[in-house]
């Protein structure tokens, strides 16, 4: 039970980090309403921020797994569009991992 509580974070996130390939494109506060368009390997992905949560709204990939992840709102949650090489990760006080690779 202790390991479950340690590994599964329900801490609210405060910051969104967007990566394209190996580059960090930016960090954004989640306390806003904003739509971002990010260029990836296949085309443009649209990322939507709404008052404490974020999601992939559109992506040019075939299976749309990144979009099906839905809204993210807790620290250390991540959604990745592998074909387009775009990732969004929510950060809190402490990161659960040190890097993401495609």
Image (cartoon, grey):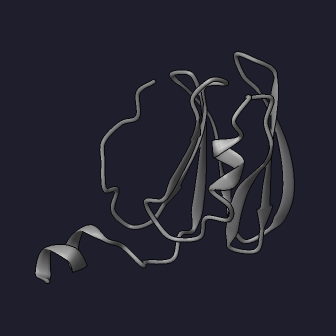
Residue that appears at 58% across and 60% down: 15
Q: Establish if 9 lies above or below 29.
A: below
Q: Going by the picture, which residue comes out furthest to the left?
A: 2
| In the foreground, 34 or 9 | 9
Which picture quadrant has residue 49?
Answer: bottom right
Quarter of the figure that contains the N terminus: bottom left
Query: Which residue of the protein is positioned furthest toward the top in this rendering?
Result: 41
In the rendered image, residue 66, in percent from the top left (x then y), is placed at 65, 45
Determine the residue located farthest toward the front in the rendered image.
Answer: 63
In the displayed structure, 4 sits above or below 43; it is below
Nearest the eye: 63 or 20? 63
Q: Residue at x 71, y 40 (%)?
A: 64
Residue that appears at 51% across and 77% down: 12
Where does residue 84 sit, x and y in percent of width and height? 67, 24
Q: Indicate the quadrant where residue 102 lies.
A: top left
Residue 101 falls left or right of residue 44: left
Compared with 90, 41 (above or below) is above
Residue 91 image point, x, y percent? 48, 59
Q: Is residue 29 above or below residue 89?
A: below
The answer to which image quadrant residue 69 occupies is bottom right
Left or right of residue 2: residue 28: right
């Amino acid at each position: 039970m202790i390991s479950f509580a340690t590994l599964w974070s329900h801490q609210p996130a405060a910051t969104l980090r967007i990566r394209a390939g190996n580059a960090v494109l930016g960090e954004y506060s989640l306390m806003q309403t904003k739509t971002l368009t990010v260029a990836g390997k296949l085309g443009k992905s649209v990322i939507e921020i709404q008052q404490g949560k974020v999601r992939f709204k559109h992506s040019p990939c075939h299976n749309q797994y990144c979009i099906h992840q839905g809204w993210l709102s807790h620290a250390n949650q991540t959604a990745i569009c592998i074909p387009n090489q775009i990732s969004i990760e929510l950060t809190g006080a402490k990161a659960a991992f040190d890097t993401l690779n495609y």
